[in-house]
Image: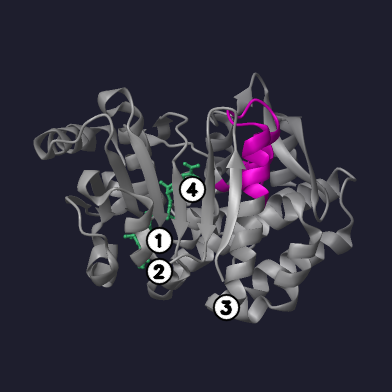
Amino acid sequence: MEQRIRVGTPSYSYDVVVGGALRTLPSYIDSSDAFALVDAQVARLHGGTLPVCPTMMLEGAEAAKHLGSLPSIYRWLLAQGAHRKSTLLAIGGGAVCDVAGFVAATYMRGIRLGLAPTTLLAQVDAAVGGKNGLNLDGYKNIVGTFNQPSFVLCDPAMLRTLPLVELRSGLAEMVKCAIIADAHMFERMEAQADEVGRGNINVLLPLIADAVRIKSRIVSADEREAGLRRVLNLGHTWGHALEAVTGLPHGLCVSVGVDFAARLSVRRGLLSPNAHQRIRQLLTAMGLPVSAQADEARALEALRNDKKRHGGAVDFVLICDIGQVVVESIDYTDIQTFVLS
Ligand SMILES: NC(=O)c1ccc[n+]([C@@H]2O[C@H](COP(=O)([O-])OP(=O)(O)OC[C@H]3O[C@@H](n4cnc5c(N)ncnc54)[C@H](O)[C@@H]3O)[C@@H](O)[C@H]2O)c1
């Protein structure tokens, strides 16, 4: 069943439609004035359901998410006659949504943007909140804008073709959301962990809506990451450090990072060992990792270079209870001791 979740930021309000079908996309746009950036893999798998409008394929998803891709996209839009009243559609995972978000924010100083995220991670995270980021010279998401879309359409049928590792990446972000703000969602994930881990669409759908609702509440209150929005980094501080040194997929590193944050929270007397155990069990039951083979010294070095570091301290999202988190600035040397002890 379709659910509409309102994102109400100071700059723009729009609906995230969870459970809508991609074939209804034409009803959201004027097809004679829409242009689509489409993940080439999605086009191969779901070509029949894509809207009929001028389309540019992006091959390689993350590989196309860098500044160097932009000139050819701008030139293509110009050649197609895209103008200030046109709509740019993104149909693909978070990478394509990020590229389209940036292009729509900058082409002719901004055109309308519509997002049809096709991965679980993009549906619950990347497409919600109006941030985009492009990579440059090995720096991830170092260039970007805040640019809210006009609508987001999440079609669960897209998820049927997702490789398991991509499904798990999205699940890690969903567990993160539940820990941040919704103990009830966490309990429902616990009760259905098997089916969730297998990607059962019927079981996933209400949980996707819950995750979108949580993110939408947070970004509506803090569009530009001045404060509250930082809680969404739960699991990402250590996760990014691991990603940098292991090259493991982002979502799997987030899963390990969530468990790391939980252990650190127990160590600092914030979280009960029992709650940590539940977090660890849920991640494991869904097939997500809670540890990674990594050179800890190199991961600590990556943490030291994290852009969220201020002076000698690193901002960590810690867990007080399932459904409740806090951001704390922790001395880098304390983290070092914790990791190496
Ligand atoms: N802007 C934000 O707020 C935000 C938040 C989180 C993540 N991100 C960004 O999102 C990106 C990660 O997103 P992602 O995990 O969706 O990765 P992705 O876009 O790279 O897609 C992952 C893989 O899945 C394939 N794919 C996409 N849809 C598919 C489908 N329905 N069936 C089969 N395969 C499909 C893609 O071709 C790709 O190979 C990163 O670049 C990250 O920085 C942005």
Q: Which comes sooner in the sequence, label 3 or label 2? A: 2
Q: Amino acid at mark 2?
A: Met
Front label number (2 vs 4): 2
Residue 158: give its label. Answer: 2
Q: Is residue 216 on the magenta stretch?
A: yes
Count of numbered circles on the image: 4
* Mark 4 close to ligand 1, CB under 8 Å: yes
Give how far apart the Cα atoms at labels 2 and 4 are. Answer: 16 Å
Q: Amino acid at mark 3?
A: Asn
Instruction: Please identify the residue farthest to the top as the structure is shown.
Output: 311
Colouring scheme applied when the structure was drawn:
one colour
Please, is residue 168 above or below residue 74 in the view?
Answer: below
Where is residue 203 drawn, in percent x and y? Answer: 61, 76
Residue at 74% x, 63% y: name it.
185
Residue 29: give its label. Answer: none
Badge 2: how crowded within 10 Å, few (<14), some, or many (20+)?
many
Q: Amino acid at mark 4?
A: Ala
Give how far apart the Cα atoms at labels 4 and 1 are. Answer: 11 Å
Name the foreground residue: 242 vs 149: 149
Residue that label 3 marks? 202
Residue 158 showing in the rendered view: yes
User: In what element is the residue under mark 4?
Assistant: helix
Give how far apart the Cα atoms at labels 2 and 1 are. Answer: 5 Å
Residue at 70% x, 34% y: name it.
228
Residue that label 1 marks? 118
User: In what element is the residue under mark 2?
Assistant: helix
Q: Which comes sooner in the sequence, label 2 or label 4? A: 4
Where is residue 40 drawn, in percent x and y? Answer: 23, 59
User: Left of 336 or right of it: where is 295?
Assistant: left
